[in-house]
Image (spheres, rainbow, N blue to C red):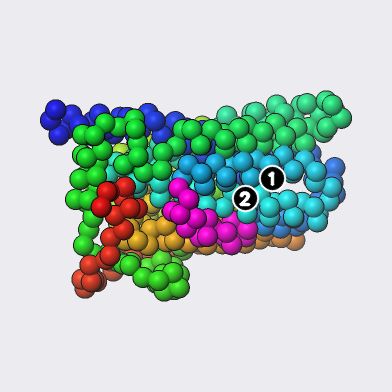
Amino acid sequence: MEKTAIEKATIRKITIRLIPFLMLCYFFSMLDRTNIGVAALQMNADVGLSTAAYGLGGSLFFVAYFLFEVPSNLAMQKFGARRWMGRIMVTWGIAVVLMALTRGPLSFYFLRFLLGAAEAGFFPGIILYLTYWYPVRYRAQMITVFSIANALSSFIGSPITASLMLADGVLGLTGWQWVFVGEGIPTIMLGFACFWVLTDRPQTASWLNDEERAWLAERLQSELPKDHAVGHMPLGRLLRNPYVWALILVCSGASSTVAALGVWQPQLLKAFGMSNFQAGIINAIPYGIAAALMMFWSISSDRTGERRWHTALPLFAVALGFVGVLFAGGSLVVTVVLLSVIMLAYSSFKGPFWAFSGQVLSPTTAAAGIAAINGTSNLIAAGMVAAVGTVRESTGSLVMGLMPLVGLCTMGGILVLFLDRRARRRPPLEPAVIDQQNLGVAS
């Protein structure tokens, strides 16, 4: 069998085995994280949550996510993806079901924090996991394929959540309680499925033959660069590294965008005079457009090998989209079109950005580095979610509360262009100590 034939067969087997299941897991990750936006249309009045209290509770998810993300990713390296991802999903599924017990601000704060702690490490863990299986030329596309589940979780999930809200009164539960129970139980079931579906490393994959495992090991080994902007270093130094902090700031604009819209977009749409169900349905439109079109940007990035502009331009598009929402003139159609542009740009950002980050971080720093980038950017997103609620309560304008995202995304776009130039001009480093095990290569 020729090498190109081996490559096609190996990549096809990996993709069929892993990607659909990981997409389903990520679908419920984002659904369970953002269903609060639709549930709040009824829940806030039922339990007495003010706008500021709702915003604060929404942000506490990201605070917990930040605190537990790096330890969680390091634990995945120790225990393996099969056991650790299963643990994450079971515990966060339980936390989602417990959200139905919300009785007021304090219980809401506690349960959102618990959900963030339980889910911490899932997304960066999957990003790290995909680097064990895919050569560089496939990574942006595969990260984007996996991330389509993010958009689908709201495109499909918003109508599902809105439909569950219609079960108000069934078995003595309110509609918003059915949202958490009905969407938390499938997550628990998927967590147990992880133990049978996932394989920790390529060298233990019985569903690849010897020739395919050998090709993958050789290919991953051959792609190890001798120089990284962030080489092998202790965790403390890594968390102080300027390149890592630059990547955090770049990522924070995108993270803040999806977090803010996930929490506040249904309320922005309901302000046009819609019912809860109608707002849930219209809320799905931007995500559906993003799911349909986001792959084209990552395919372009992988084909050309260009990461810098493919990362920066979506951030600039998000910033322009928010400016447009400010001047939409109260038009629902224009607002939905602009929200669709924002969501498409955010979704297109993810594949090239994480592929670019993989070029900056060495294999030995990837687990902690990816978690630090994602976790800290989510902490910044938490501040943004809370700030939107505070600004809305003080000004009466939800759109004004979204305006800080313009500056954050613009700064991120400029920074990634500068970061890429600095990374390419820096002097050679000492060759990094390569962790063969992390790459699934037998010693």
Read off the residue under disc 1.
95
Magenta stretch containing residue 298, yes or no?
A: no
Q: Quadrant of residue 13?
A: top left
Q: Are marks 2 and 1 in contact (CB under 8 Å)?
A: yes
Q: Residue at x 22, y 67 (%)?
A: 431
Label annotation for residue 118: 2
Q: Nearer the viewer, residue 435 or 97?
A: 435
Residue 129 point in image, percent of width and height: 40, 46
Image check: 342 left or right of 201?
Answer: right
Q: Secondary structure at mark 1?
A: helix
In the image, residue 383 sits, relative to residue 104, either above or below, namely below
Q: Secondary structure at mark 2?
A: helix
- Residue drawn at (48%, 33%) of the image: 196
First to last magenta residue range = 63-80
Q: Amino acid at mark 2?
A: Ala
Q: Residue at x 67, y 33 (%)?
A: 185
The image quadrant that residue 396 belongs to is bottom right
Quick one: 399 or 51, which is closer to the camera? 51
- Rendered position, 347 above or below 61: above
In the rendered structure, the answer to whether residue 205 lies left or right of residue 277 reads left
